[in-house]
Amino acid sequence: MTSTLTAPTTTATARPHVRTTGVPLTALTALEVRKSLSTRSGKLVAIAATLVAPAAITVVLLAGEEAGRAVEMIAVLGSLGALVLLALGVLSTAGEWTHRTVQTTFLTVPRRGRVVTAKVVAAAGLGAVLTAVGVGVACALLALGGDGVTWDGTARAAAVLVAGGAAFTVVGAGIGAALTNAPAALTGAYLVVLGVFPVLLTARPEIGEKLDPTTSLVLLAAGPATATPVLVLTGWVLLSVVAGTLVTLRRAVA
C-alpha cells in the first residue's frame, strides 16, 4: 500500500493597507493655529495686536490732531501691531516647551521638521490675517474721522505691513523655539527690540538701521522700497527660523 503525500497549500492573504504618509501638513498647520489661539494669553495677544493700531488712530482723532498723510500714520501705528505679534510667535513655540505640551506634539508627529514647518506657516498666516484686520479697521476709522487726509501710497503701506506682521510673528516663533522658554524669550526679544536697538539708533544710526527690524518695517511701509529694510527683515526671519529649527530637531524632550 502506498500513500501519496501532498504538500499543504497556503493561501495568500491580502495585507491591510498601511498609511505611511502621516498627518497632512495642512491639518498640522490648522492645528497649530488653533493651539496658538486656544490659551488665554494667545487670545489676549491676538486681540491686542489687532486693536493697537485702531486704538491709536482713535486717540489721535479724539485729540483733534491733523491726520496729514495716512501712509505715515498707518506705517508707524501698524508697526506697533507687529511688535505685539512678536509675542504671539514666541508663545506658539516656547509656550509648548514651558508647559511641556511639546511631548504630546512630538508623540503625535514624530517628524519634528514637519512640526516646525507647520508652526512657521501657521505663525505667518496668523500674523498676516491679524495685521490685515487691524490695518483695515484703522484705515476705516481714519477715513470716517480724519479731515484732509491724503491716501497716496496707503495701499502699498498696508500690503507691506501685512507682510511685516507675518514676518514678525515668524521671528517670534523662531526665537521661542530657539530658547524654549517663554519668559526668557519674551524678555530677551523685547529687551533687544525696545531697549538695545533704540539706543543703537541714537548712538550709531548707520548701524542701527541695518539691524533694527521695526525701523526697517516703518521705512519700508512709509517710503519707497529699498534693499536694506528688505534684507534686514529677511535676515531676521531666516536666522530665527534656522536657530529654532536646529534646537527643535536636536533637543531632547524631558
Image (spheres, grey):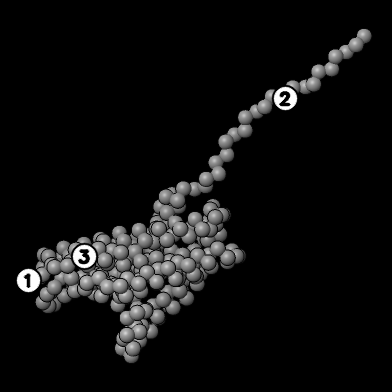
Point 42% across, 74% down: residue? 186
Taking depth in this image into account, of 224 and 146 the one nearest to the observer is: 224
Residue 10: mark in rendering: 2
Q: Quadrant of the C terminus?
A: bottom right
Dividing the picture into quadrants, the one containing residue 10 is: top right
Give the residue at mark 1. 148
Residue 79, image x and y in percent? 28, 72
- Amino acid beneath label 3: Arg
Residue 156: mark in rendering: 3
Point 21% across, 62% down: residue? 136
Q: Residues within 10 Å of mark 1 (few under 14, many from 20)?
A: few
Q: CA distance from mark 2 to mark 3?
A: 72 Å
- Residue 137 seen anywhere in this rendered image of the structure: no
First in sequence, mark 1 or 3: give its number: 1
Whether the residues at callouts 2 and 3 have beta carbons within 8 Å, the answer is: no
First in sequence, mark 2 or 3: give its number: 2
Residue 93, image x and y in percent? 46, 65
- Amino acid beneath label 1: Gly
Q: Quadrant of the N terminus?
A: top right
